[in-house]
Image (cartoon, rainbow, N blue to C red):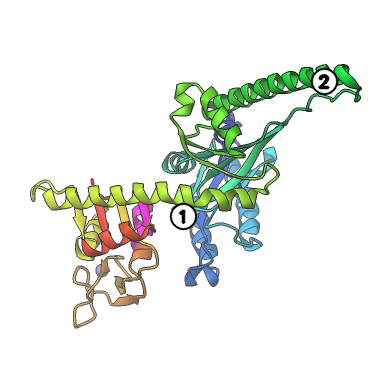
Amino acid sequence: MNLLLPQTIQTLAERTPREGSPVLSVYLHLDPSHPLNQKGGYKLVLDGFLKDIEAQIREETWLRHFEEDAEWVRRKADHYLPKGKSLVLFCDVSESFFFEEALPIRMGNQAWCGSTPYIRPLLEAIEEYERYGVVLLDRERARFFIITMGSIEEISDIFQDPPVKHRSMAGSDHMRSQMVFQRRAAKWSESFLKYASDIVNDMVLHYRIDRILLAGPEDVTAELLRMFPKRVASRVVHRMRMAVQAKPAEVMEISFPAIEQIENRQEREAVEDLVTVARKANPTKEKAVLGINGILDAVNQGRVQRLFYPRGVKIPGSQCASCEVLLDHAPTDGKCPYCSSSLTEVEDLLWPASERVLATGGKIQEIRGKEAHEHLRNAGEVGAYLR
Ligand SMILES: [Zn+2]
């Protein structure tokens, strides 16, 4: 699983269109924890998309190119063992251009055939998730990691050889040599930390790091922090002890509580804001709603800008097979109040509702923190900003 480094997106964005040879872009939400996906539901979704696109292509060359691209995408989806929640595929087979990425976040299902890769959803995902830089170091070695969307990646590793100790000598010669060595070591250490500080500065810019966590012996991280320019120092949110040779999974584990605390606070504030806006809202100019009823109305009208729902909560209801309207309470006759078609029971309305929000360009926010969760539950379980 990769982290959508800004450079990756940049490379995709800069790909020049090839005359007559389109790129097929596919986003699939294939979270294996959902029963529909366990039965391979995402393959049906993909198939529907590909057929729709094919039907729209008028030009023969494009159609030929599209067919071979679609074939590659189908094969990928067929043999895919879900790693993350979503799969992103871009390809132009005739130009040997292939891009495949598993993402740990939920993305809206969509497919697109055009002259360039359709990267907007990737760009939005990058903006949506905070990026944490972890600097793990001692006086001889420094390592850098990025944590975002629940994954970690080591981005580089700089070493510097420690100064060589001279052969041992007797008497005052030895004493003097020791002093020289210590002075040199101190100087070397300072310049090494300065070097590390410069790299952190570059890393913040290059990888668009929002917050920094420093890890290592306490005296070293304290010294490094003092060397940072203000702009970098202000992003440091936490310092922690860690062995410099820690594996990425350990770095993740030790960093997690600090990150969780920050994210829980952000979630709590986001829910508080939502509730305030929803309760203040002027009835003629409604900007936010709380409760499943209002949410479904807004979803059915395609008006949800950002949907908030708690992790692990299911709200049963029904859906019209024909006009796709979502209802929390089906009328007693079991017919759709809008088109009179028959309704089907849905185990969890939040699933099709989120799909709909993503498909109409809105965002979804799953609430995980305990406090935010409780606050949202007391305010109606689900909520949304409207456009
Ligand atoms: Zn209907």
Q: What stretch of residues is rendered in magenta?
A: 353-366
For marks 2 and 1, give the CA distance: 64 Å
Answer with left or right where residue 151 lies relative to residue 340.
right
Task: Give yes or no for residue 285 being in the magenta stretch.
Answer: no
In this view, the residue in front, 271 or 121, is: 271
Q: Which numbered disc covers residue 210? A: none
State whether residue 268 appears in this view. yes
Answer with left or right where residue 241 lies relative to residue 318.
right
- Does the numbered disc 2 mark a residue whose Cβ is under 8 Å from ligand 1? no
In this view, the residue in front, 31 or 246, is: 246
| Quadrant in which the C terminus appears | top left
Q: Residues within 10 Å of mark 1 (few under 14, many from 20)?
A: many
**Three-letter residue code for mark 2:** Met
Residue 137 in picture, x, y percent from top left: 64, 36
Q: Which residue is mark 1?
A: 106
Q: Residues within 10 Å of mark 2 (few under 14, many from 20)?
A: few
Ligand 1, image quadrant it occupies = bottom left
SS at circle 2: helix
SS at circle 1: loop
Check if mark 2's residue and mark 1's residue have beta carbons within 8 Å.
no
Q: Which numbered disc covers residue 175? A: 2
Q: Nearer the viewer, mark 2 or mark 1?
A: 2
Quarter where residue 173 is shown: top right
Q: Is residue 142 above or below residue 255?
A: above
In this view, the residue in front, 36 or 115, is: 36
Q: Residue at x 32, y 58 (%)?
A: 371
In this view, the residue in front, 306 or 157, is: 157
